[in-house]
Image: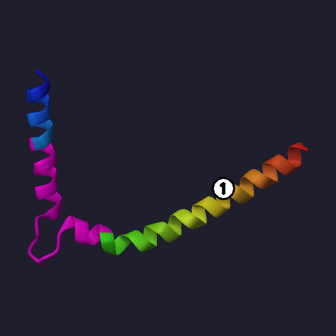
Amino acid sequence: MGLFKTIILGAAAYGAYKYVTKKDANGRSMVDDIKDRAPAWKEKIKHFKDEVEQEFKKKTAKEY
């Protein structure tokens, strides 16, 4: 049974890899799009983190 699970998981991983690296009509893949958008997502996450930190500090300052 373990070998069968390994084969199925390997086939699923291979299929997922082929799907995300498949080129579209413009010659770009999902991976290329994600690489291009990653810096913008990183900045959004940093801003969100800073906002959460500020709110947390305000709440903890009020408690003491």
19 displayed left or right of 35: left
Indicate the position of residue 26 as horizontal and vertical percent values: 12, 78
Which quadrant is the C terminus positioned in? top right
Which of the 4 quarters of the picture holds residue 10?
top left
44 displayed left or right of 5: right
Residue 12 in magenta stretch: yes
- Tag 1: residue type? Val
Q: Residue 9 or 61: which is nearer the viewer?
A: 9
Figure coloring: rainbow
- Residue placed under numbered mark 1 in the picture: 52
Indicate the position of residue 60 as horizontal and vertical percent values: 82, 47
Q: Residue visible at 59% across and 66% down?
A: 47
61 over 36 or under it: above or below: above
Q: Residue visible at 48% across and 67% down?
A: 42
22 over 17 or under it: above or below: below
Residue range (magenta): 11-34
Q: Residue 12 or 37: which is nearer the viewer?
A: 12
Determine the main secondary structure of the stretch shown in magenta.
Answer: helix
Q: Residue visible at 80% across and 54% down?
A: 58
